[in-house]
Image (cartoon, rainbow, N blue to C red):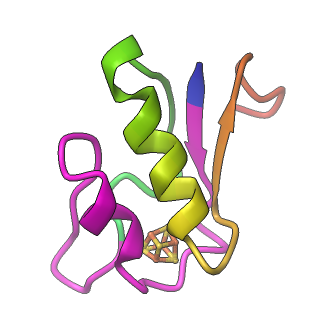
Amino acid sequence: MFIAIDAGKCMGHGRCYAVAEDLLSDDDEGFVAERGRCWELPADLVGQAQDAADACPEGAIAVTETAPADA
Ligand code: SF4
């Protein structure tokens, strides 16, 4: 599974890293520090990734079985 965070959609609500603290972190301005990145998830963090995607009100986080074509 892969996670991709759309930097253009992220508005810095901070909900994602609050529910996925082993996976995501915040930057100095409250945005998720990993925005704009796509990477393969360790199996034990897939649940946190899905929680983060569900928590994001902007729909900025995608969790997919294959890497996005534009990653
Ligand atoms: S919850 Fe969504 S909008 Fe908020 S910091 Fe995370 S990715 Fe960005």
Direction from residue 20 to residue 66 in the image, left or right: right
Check the picture and name the quadrant holding the C terminus: top right
> x and y percent of residue 4 in the render?
59, 42
Check the picture and name the quadrant holding the N terminus: top right
Q: Residue at x 42, y 86 (%)?
A: 13
Direction from residue 60 to residue 55 in the image, left or right: left
Q: Residue at x 54, y 44 (%)?
A: 50
- Asked if the magenta segment contains residue 29, the reply would be yes
Above or below: residue 47 compared with residue 12: above
Direction from residue 66 to residue 24 in the image, left or right: left
Q: Residue at x 62, y 80 (%)?
A: 57
Which residue occupies the foreground of this view, 30 or 44?
44
Q: Magenta span covers which residues?
A: 3-31
Which residue occupies the foreground of this view, 62 or 29?
62
> x and y percent of residue 47 in the render?
44, 35
Above or below: residue 67 compared with residue 48: above
> x and y percent of residue 3 in the render?
55, 36
